Image (cartoon, coloured by chain):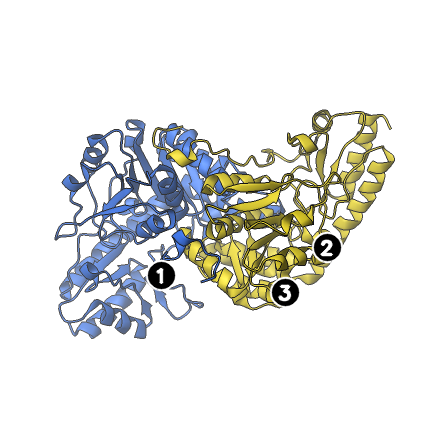
Chain colours: A yellow, B blue
Amino acid sequence: MSRFLRQGLKTLVPYVPGEQPRSVKRLIKLNTNESPFPPSPRVLAALGEGETKKLGLYSDPTADCLRRAIAAHFGVSADSVVCSNGSDEILAFALDAFCDREIGMQTPDITYGFYPVLSGLYGIPMTVRPLREDFSVDVDAFLSGRETVVLANPNAQTGVALALSEIERIVSADLNRLVVIDEAYVDFGAESAVGLTQKYDNLLVVQTFSKSRSLAGARIGFAIGAPSLTSDLETVRNSFNPYNVNRLSLLAGAEAISDEEYFEKTRREIIRVRESTKAALAELGFDFPPSMANFILARHPRISGKALSLALRERGIIVRHFGDERIRDYARITVGSEADMAYLTEQLKEIVGG
Amino acid sequence: MSRFLRQGLKTLVPYVPGEQPRSVKRLIKLNTNESPFPPSPRVLAALGEGETKKLGLYSDPTADCLRRAIAAHFGVSADSVVCSNGSDEILAFALDAFCDREIGMQTPDITYGFYPVLSGLYGIPMTVRPLREDFSVDVDAFLSGRETVVLANPNAQTGVALALSEIERIVSADLNRLVVIDEAYVDFGAESAVGLTQKYDNLLVVQTFSKSRSLAGARIGFAIGAPSLTSDLETVRNSFNPYNVNRLSLLAGAEAISDEEYFEKTRREIIRVRESTKAALAELGFDFPPSMANFILARHPRISGKALSLALRERGIIVRHFGDERIRDYARITVGSEADMAYLTEQLKEIVGG
């Protein structure tokens, strides 16, 4: 730490991303919930040499082509959409813009690890509302409290989803309190709250191209909400980094979200493989919360989460283990390709002696 | 503005980027200081379909390949380098991290318009030290004061450069005060202070790939400084957006900075065209500060800066006009290709009746 770091940041603990091995050749990477599929063929076609040659020019700071494509996909107006360099960035803009520095935010105890980091970065007080024993969100606990509500749906780490009616209960409980729903994993089986943004101006929905759109490396996120909210987010974005989405990602994102057929095909395949993997895991004696995401948080009575992760690593499979007390018996396994999951199941069988 | 925007941001005035016209087919774009050249052929070769297919995977959050390439180019250690999504982002990280919220920052009156915006975003008090009459930086004014010093060298808008010895005077005047030198335009004729970072741990040098590396659309910036400073910046970066540079830009940047031959050829050509354009402008009766950047801030006794910009726009050339009182008689003209500048000169001749 330098002597120049300002006081407020001296105790900041940054987010620790999942490992990105230098070479993925011999490793099956099931630790950061990426898609097992390449991007849509339309993305590959769009990013040819002609576009690469234009990289000397700035990207469109209004992200117009991408915002229009997202708006068309969801049937909302383009001014309801703000784009960002990954969804972490739009979450940061939103919490910075909308969290009262006295009242702060409220979020479950087990959820995306980035929320407490942002709370530290911006000095936003964080109220933690524990998940129920079965890892479901305690909706009643989020009906009161003036703090901005931040929920991932399906929830990060657990994959457990809230019904849309439950989200609406939280949003409508207090129209003067903002609710941020992080839908990074929504396309794998949960109901999106985007439709509710047309009815409630205290709801912001955040999504990403990193999971169901197979574009984690392109860094594209976005938020949908009432134009009063998105214009505030544009103010923050333009005060921080007006050209925040690069040229090629603007093109890639517009193509990816327009290719509904490829999107449907790949997300359905991931859901199918998730369900067959769940069945195989259950047969081996694993238990897990009912994941509606592209990962499974699984534990086995005969091995700790950490030991399981290490044993898989030795067999060339990387999964993620979290130290939080409530989930440290588990390992979080991304749903990869069918072949990857078959290999995983084989290895797990040997490890747990099923 | 929504009712949710926090108090501290209600008066925030965002940065206004130069216009990015939807179609650049019939317009000569000399308003945002982009390079007239495409990126290095090595960049084009690196971003093939094979890499596009891997966009489903996250980028390396340590930006290792890019940091190493930058470090090798400058002869510094890789841990002295932090990469960002454009240099605006690393400037934001640096000012957020290192500006004391009571003492703040000091910067010239005429400089990059993004500094006051960041001051507003982060609530950093800003002390303004006017440029001299000839637009040179008043170095003596920056020797005292505890505020973090933020200087663009060459300076934005004017193109006027400070000698390295002057930068060192400012840095060495107070070793307990941080100095940030923004070298966006340094490759067009000024001396870089990167070497001084090996001697002074209170100096941070910021550069970009958007100008001399012909990669504005890829969004790559970086900072070089003592590892104590860069590790603080990594803390902020990892608390904000750990995957802040996308996969293709990491590759593009590493290739671009390794291709010394292409870099030398293109930057020398831009300098050559700048000097011949200066001569042509002088002949038409324009005057301008001595630009060491890839733009010329020019004015003519017979036409206002705004009228000049509009007249050029009508002739298919976009330049930038700023409303600040001290430079509103001027138009800022990016140094484009030789052909573009010949066309510009022709049009200016007609406009000012030279």
Q: Which residue is mark 1?
A: B18
**Which of the pair A286/A40 is nearer the observer?**
A286
Say few, some or many: other residues with alpha carbon within 10 Å of mark 2 (under 14 / 14 to 19 / 20 or more).
few
* Residue A275 appears in the rendering: yes
As drawn, is B338 to the left or to the right of B329?
Answer: right
| Distance between the alpha carbons at the discs numbered 2 and 3 | 22 Å
| Chain letter for mark 2 | A
| Image spot of residue B62 (x, y percent) | 51, 35
Do discs 2 and 3 share a chain? yes
Disc nearest the viewer among 1 and 3: 3
Say few, some or many: other residues with alpha carbon within 10 Å of mark 1 (under 14 / 14 to 19 / 20 or more).
some
SS class of the residue under badge 1?
loop
Q: Which residue is mark 3?
A: A73
Compared to A148, does B74 lie above or below? above
| Distance between the alpha carbons at the discs numbered 1 and 2 | 44 Å
| Image spot of residue B192 (x, y percent) | 28, 38
| Distance between the alpha carbons at the discs numbered 1 and 3 | 29 Å
Task: Assign the N terminus of chain B to one quadrant of the image.
Answer: bottom left
| Chain letter for mark 1 | B
Q: How many marks?
A: 3
Pointer 1 with pointer 3, Cβ within 8 A = no
SS class of the residue under badge 3?
helix
Q: Say which amino acid is labelled 3.
A: His
Pointer 1 with pointer 2, Cβ within 8 A = no
Do discs 1 and 3 share a chain? no
Q: Which residue is mark 2?
A: A163
